[in-house]
Image (spheres, rainbow, N blue to C red):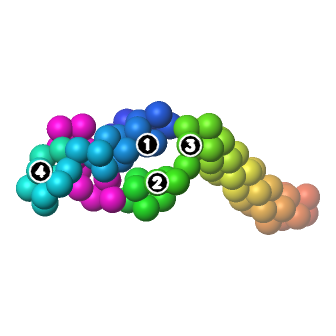
């Protein structure tokens, strides 16, 4: 699994790619020279193109918090299913 990109990379690399192309072949070369695949470049540009570094950092923090909360909810739901049976001695 690839390492997670920093907020600065997500904002800066597509900007560098936008600045350094005039023709298709040069554009593909420019994207490769900044260490991105074309797919990643266009995905980041679509998702984060208008965001600033601070906004991307906040977005990543919120996504992490959401995943933590989803795990907590699933743990509580599982406990709610198991506890009534354990209280009756059905374990």
Classify mark 3: residues with Cα within 10 Å, few (<14), some (14-19) or many (20+): some
13 within the magenta span: no
Q: Is residue 90 visible?
A: no
In the picture, the disc for residue 26 is: 4
Residue 38: x and y in percent read 23, 55
Q: Point out the image quarter for the N terminus.
A: top left
Please tell me whether mark 1 sits on a helix, a strand or a loop.
helix
Q: Are marks 2 and 1 in contact (CB under 8 Å)?
A: no
* Image spot of residue 42 (x, y percent): 33, 59
Q: Earlier in the sequence, mark 3 or mark 4?
A: 4
**Rendered location of residue 26, percent (x, y):** 11, 50
Q: Disc 2 on helix, strand or loop?
A: loop
Q: Is 69 drawn above or below residue 77 in the view shown?
A: above
Pointer 2 residue: 49
Residue drawn at (48%, 59%) of the image? 47
Q: CA distance from mark 4 to mark 1?
A: 21 Å
Q: Residue at x 40, y 56 (%)?
A: 45
Pick whichever, 2 or 27, lies toward us. Answer: 27
Residue depth check, mark 3 versus mark 1: number of the one nearer the observer: 3
State which quarter of the image contains the C terminus. bottom right
Cα distance, mark 3 to mark 1? 10 Å
Left or right, 84 with reference to 57? right
Magenta range is 31-42
Q: In the displayed structure, does residue 76 sit left or right of residue 20?
A: right
Residue 10 image label: 1
Residue matched to label 3: 52
Does the rendering let one see residue 37? Answer: yes
The mark lying in front, picked from 4 and 1, is: 4
């Amino acid at each position: 699994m690839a390492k997670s990109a920093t907020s600065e990379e997500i904002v800066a690399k597509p900007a560098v790619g936008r600045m350094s192309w005039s023709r298709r072949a040069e554009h593909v070369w420019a994207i490769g020279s900044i260490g991105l695949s074309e797919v990643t470049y266009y995905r980041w540009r679509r998702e984060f193109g208008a965001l600033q570094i601070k906004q991307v950092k906040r977005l990543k923090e919120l996504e992490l918090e959401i995943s933590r909360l989803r795990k907590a909810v699933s743990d509580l739901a599982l406990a709610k299913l198991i506890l009534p049976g354990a209280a009756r001695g059905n374990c």
